[in-house]
Amino acid sequence: MNKIKVYNSLTQKLEEFIPWDPPRVKMYCCGPTVYDLLHVGNFRGAVFYNFLRNFLEHEGYEVTFVYNFTDVDDKIINRARSESVTSEQISQRFIEEFWRDFNQLKLRPHSANPRVTDTIPEIINFVEGLIQKGMAYVTSDGDVYFAISQFPEYGKLSHRRVEELETGVRIEVNEKKRNPLDFALWKSSSGDEPRWKSPWGEGRPGWHIECSAMIHKHLGAPIDIHGGGMDLIFPHHENEIAQSEGLLAKPFVKYWVHNNLIQLKGSKMSKSLGNIITARDFFNQYHPEIYKFMVLSVHYRSVLDLGDEAIARSIRLLSKIYSALAWAEEVLHSQQADKDEHKQNQEFAALSHQTWQAVLEAGRHDFNSALMISHGYELIKSFNQKYRRGMKIHHEMISASRVLLDFYKKLGNLLSLFLEPPSQFLKNLDDHLLQEMGLNRQDIQNKVDRRSQLRKERRFQEADLLRSELNGCGIQVHDLPDGTSYWEVDKST
Ligand SMILES: [Zn+2]
């Protein structure tokens, strides 16, 4: 197998990826707490870890990928109260809403999607094991806390000493805890809170224990990759390590992989203003493909900008790619292609092969999807230089078109991107660009039709004037061999 390098948050180093039991890879990623629609940044992980898994499988690994739902949580309880319904109704509703968004992204299904409510016996066993080992304690009112003093390595993932963590983090005042950093494994429930019977009275699990118990149940520790957003490193993942390694006295995760968060530069959205955009709104306003493209165009450890300017820039780039793909497809559907002898364009095939090697190289270096996409884009540029729309279709162009489409199919399968029907999707992208340029599709079409009419009447001077006018506002017109004309938004700038 080829060497893959991955950045491990635990060691803060790039390490060679060697799973515990190759070719098998056990991978877990923290899924959403289901109390609301997900925010536009929340799907970054879903898109990135889907790619990470695709890439590992391409490299010959067999990946089991578990992605959970946190369906027991105070936020769920609060929402249920405000709507006078049960917690179960809230979590069920937002799991369904999650799937509506997730399915739009056309990512691969996970190997399993466990829920906390299906994992209660395992959670109780886990907590009991920790109490028996003296790593957790029960309070007089039936809460159970993990005693971080019993886990000397506490802080090893966030790379901070316990004293630093104590001062650096806002900690709720709670007299029942022996140490302010001790965290709840089990909370007693009262009133309308969801509850299960346990050796410590009726209650519900704390957040951190859920993920650990689901990992043990569905994958078995140790696992190879644990993923999640950087905001989960402390306390969530730190606590997962403490409780899992506390119980098992062996390593829990080999590679901790964390994706960075998002920013909305140049946009007016902010949490304090309460106008954070949901993924649902983003997908409706733009397209899930544009979202995926933006996520994967940035290395997963860098901040992702989803602001208005970044969106506009991405649409333009994506539209250049789809424009070339749409043209390549038209070339292959042309009459000339029917008669073609399928002789290979050696030069373009060699370039594509070389580019593909560079793509794989980028993936093997810490899953650099951004570099993969930019290598792919170089191939588009080379194609456009020689075989642009409007040029005469000939054998070399036909072969290059075939090579380009094959390349993008392979790249698309790795990234779960570039798989939309090109001409149809290009139209969608053009609509966004037209809107940005303040142009109207119907007006342009009318002008292009008028120009075709002028050409038919052999009034070429007037036709040329109209063409210049269209070019001037950023529209390219291509005359096709059958006498009709085709227009698109100019992508050359
Ligand atoms: Zn988790």
Image: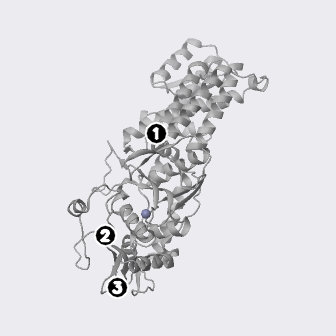
Q: CA distance from mark 3 to mark 2?
A: 19 Å
Residue beneath the point at 45% across and 42% down: 294
Q: Point out the frontmost of discs 3 and 2.
A: 2
Point out which mark residue 142 bears: 3
**In contact (CB < 8 Å): disc 3 and disc 2:** no
Q: Is mark 3 within 8 Å of ligand 1?
A: no
Q: CA distance from mark 1 to mark 3?
A: 49 Å
Mark 1 / mark 2, whichever is N-terminal: 2
Residue beneath the point at 43% across and 67% down: 249
Instruction: Report the front residue among 306 and 117.
Output: 117
Mark 2 closeness class: few <14, some 14–19, many ≥20 residues within 10 Å: many
Which residue was labeled with disc 1?
A: 297
Q: CA distance from mark 1 to mark 2?
A: 40 Å
Instruction: Tell me: residue 297, above or below residue 70.
Output: above
Instruction: Tell me: residue 327, above or below residue 74.
Output: above
Residue at the farthest left position:
167
Q: Is residue 93 left or right of residue 457?
A: left
> What amino acid type is highlighted by mark number 1?
Ser
Residue beneath the point at 46% across and 39% down: 297
**In contact (CB < 8 Å): disc 1 and disc 2:** no
The secondary structure type at the circle numbered 2 is helix
- Horizontal and vertical percent position of residue 402: 68, 29
Residue 322 figure quarter:
top right
Q: How many numbered callouts? A: 3
Which residue was labeled with disc 2?
A: 148
Residue 199 figure quarter:
bottom left
Q: Is residue 86 visible?
A: no
The secondary structure type at the circle numbered 3 is loop
